[in-house]
């Protein structure tokens, strides 16, 4: 796979045949996926869905010392108005105290530019941003309007290359081009690989120096090589808290491994280090497969991408995959044995209160699958429904280990709250775990809600499993708030919709 000669990456529909609409059982989903019969699919009726431009900010918006320029009408990117506070909190948690903060500009395209083109405005905006902020990088988010009128943002970037200090990174993220918004991750990585990790940028390895002895020189280079051979690119995601990063670093350090955390919250100049690591380790294939494949092909850095360290089983698999790469399985097994023993003892009293409670999980395919497995296997709960934003081959590893109950529906849908509310009204789970944007729909049904990730909470590794269990136990002790909310809040759907099948409008290819 090498798409870097092109200006933009292919969509996930084209590259992976990713599915955005499905309703049925886990067996049906897996059979279709494994036999390559799961189509991209669609809907005869759909509510609004996400835009890949917004998700591209999930990485680009975290990069310190960078500025984002939205090339489009002023409404595109207005979602960032709500995030400077949380962004600052996330940067501070990682010790990035002196960063620019979240700075973004819009080229504010109007009818005039739709007719005459918007490249001049983009050029002027980039020059002004560079003059005012002197950032290391400027991400240019190309939205729907320039994609339709044919503005060439790559040429603008290349023409300005010698006039600005910053690296300019064009991102082709027009929302209308894909229904699989995870395409956004490929868009950002594409820009990073093409414009930040370029050949002329060489990571400074220790070189022979004149002011120290030959022996000291050799020792320095030897130490560097030894460290490099044990260094992991740990690929984080923006929804990962600092506490989660610390937990994974704790486990990897316990195996005597060093960690280079990226891409989120990493300054632009740190990306070049990734070429030099022994291996890249992802916690989410949905997020990283495009990047790690290119890193392997271009710079020979192998990767591990199988699972996410959520819950006991998947944390064990994640650690053992890494240990096998470094040939240290026995050491890892010892670590895992001790961690699992302590965690199971701590979970025992909580498990008693959660056993047999029913749960509905909604998230990206990897997070949804792994959290469902955690709830069933570690806490004895019963999963009564799973919703994934999209589905592709990377989900098979996790969904294969889900309980294969015909009665447990799997829904593939990005947004589409009408399908979700219909399902929840029938299933009536004891608890719902989902993303901030979708949680309100469950809460209005009277179902207690636990966010499936949070900027300051712990979810990953052994610590995450324990903390998730404690939060669930506390939530289920008193669901009064949600019961009261359901009595006063209304849903926007006719009663007749709840009599129909939730998947009525899904159309298979
Ligand atoms: S769908 Fe297009 S116009 Fe709408 S926010 Fe996304 S990029 Fe902007």
Image (cartoon, rainbow, N blue to C red):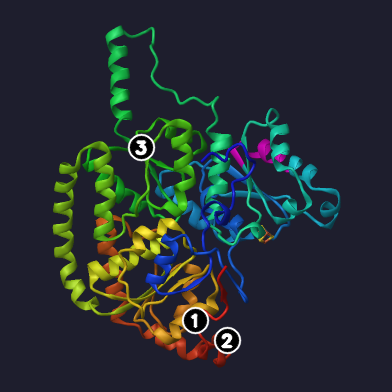
| Residue visible at 30% across and 49% down in the picture | 248
Residue 165 marker = none
Closer to the N terminus: mark 1 or mark 2? 1
Q: With 91 as the anchor, is 103 left or right in this view? A: right
Marks 3 and 2 close (CB-CB < 8 Å): no
Mark 3 and mark 1 in contact? Answer it, CB < 8 Å. Answer: no
Number of numbered markers: 3
User: Helix or strand or loop: what does disc 1 sit on?
Assistant: helix
Near mark 1 (Cα within 10 A), the count class, few <14, some 14-19 or many ≥20, is many
The location of residue 264, given as percent across then percent down, is: 46, 47
Q: 220 above or below 285?
A: above
Q: Position of residue 108 (x, y in %)?
A: 75, 54
Q: Is residue 164 left or right of residue 242?
A: right
- Numbered circle sitting on residue 493: 2
Q: Residues within 10 Å of mark 3 (few under 14, many from 20)?
A: many
- Asked if the residue at tag 2 contacts the one at tag 1, i.e. Cβ–Cβ closer than 8 Å, the answer is yes
Magenta range: 125-138
Report, in whole angstroms, how far the alpha carbon at label 3 lies from the one at label 1: 43 Å
Residue 421 — which label?
1
Q: Which secondary structure type mostly characterizes the magenta part of the structure?
A: helix
Residue 279: assigned label: 3
Could you say which quadrant of the image residue 111 lies in?
bottom right
For the question of whether residue 108 can be seen, the reply is no
Q: In which quadrant of this rendering is ligand 1 seen? A: bottom right
Q: Secondary structure at mark 2?
A: loop
Nearer to me, 387 or 345: 387
The answer to whether 285 appears left or right of 49 in the picture is left
Residue 132 on the magenta segment: yes
Q: Is residue 370 left or right of residue 119?
A: left
């Amino acid at each position: 796979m090498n798409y870097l000669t092109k200006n933009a990456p292919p969509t996930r529909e084209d590259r992976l045949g990713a599915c955005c609409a499905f309703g049925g059982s886990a067996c049906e989903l897996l059979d279709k996926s494994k036999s390559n019969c799961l189509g991209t699919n669609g809907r005869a009726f759909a509510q609004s869905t996400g835009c890949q431009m917004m998700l591209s900010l999930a990485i680009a918006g975290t990069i310190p010392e960078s500025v984002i320029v939205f090339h489009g009408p002023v409404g595109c990117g207005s979602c960032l108005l709500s995030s400077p506070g949380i962004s600052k909190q996330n940067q501070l948690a990682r010790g990035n105290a002196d960063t620019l903060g979240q700075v973004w500009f819009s080229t504010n395209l109007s009818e005039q530019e739709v007719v005459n083109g918007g490249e001049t405005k983009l050029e002027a905006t980039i020059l002004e941003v560079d003059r005012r902020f002197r950032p290391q990088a400027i991400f240019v988010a190309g939205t729907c309007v320039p994609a339709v009128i044919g503005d060439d943002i790559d040429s603008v970037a290349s023409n300005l290359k010698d006039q600005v200090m910053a690296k300019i990174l064009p991102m082709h993220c027009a929302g209308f081009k894909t229904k699989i918004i995870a395409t956004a991750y490929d868009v950002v990585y594409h820009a990073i690989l093409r414009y930040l990790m370029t050949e002329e940028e060489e990571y400074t390895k220790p070189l022979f120096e004149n002011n120290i002895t030959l022996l000291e020189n050799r020792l320095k280079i030897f130490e560097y090589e030894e460290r490099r051979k044990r260094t992991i690119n740990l690929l984080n995601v923006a929804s990962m808290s600092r506490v989660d990063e610390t937990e994974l670093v704790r486990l990897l350090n316990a195996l005597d491994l060093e960690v280079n955390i990226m891409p989120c919250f990493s300054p632009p100049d740190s990306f070049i280090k990734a070429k030099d690591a022994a291996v890249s380790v992802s916690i989410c294939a949905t997020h990283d497969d495009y990047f790690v494949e290119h890193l392997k092909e271009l710079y020979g850095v192998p990767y591990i991408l199988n699972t996410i360290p959520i819950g006991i089983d998947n944390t064990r698999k994640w650690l053992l995959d890494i240990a096998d790469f470094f040939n240290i399985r026995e050491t890892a097994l010892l670590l895992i044995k001790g961690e699992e023993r302590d965690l199971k003892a701590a979970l025992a009293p909580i498990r008693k209160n959660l056993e047999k409670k029913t749960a509905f999980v909604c998230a990206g395919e990897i997070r949804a699958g792994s959290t469902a497995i955690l709830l069933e296997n570690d806490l004895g709960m019963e999963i009564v429904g799973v919703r994934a934003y999209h589905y592709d081959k990377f989900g098979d590893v996790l969904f294969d280990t889900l309980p294969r109950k015909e009665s447990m529906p799997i829904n593939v849908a990005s947004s589409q709250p009408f399908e979700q509310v219909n399902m929840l009204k029938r299933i009536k789970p004891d608890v719902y775990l989902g993303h901030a944007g979708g949680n309100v729909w469950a809460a209005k049904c009277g179902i207690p809600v636990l966010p499936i990730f949070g900027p300051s909470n712990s979810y990953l590794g052994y610590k995450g499993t324990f903390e998730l269990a404690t939060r669930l136990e506390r939530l289920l002790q008193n669901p009064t708030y949600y019961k009261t909310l359901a009595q006063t809040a209304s849903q926007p759907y006719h009663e007749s919709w709840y009599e129909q099948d939730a998947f009525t409008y899904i159309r298979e290819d």
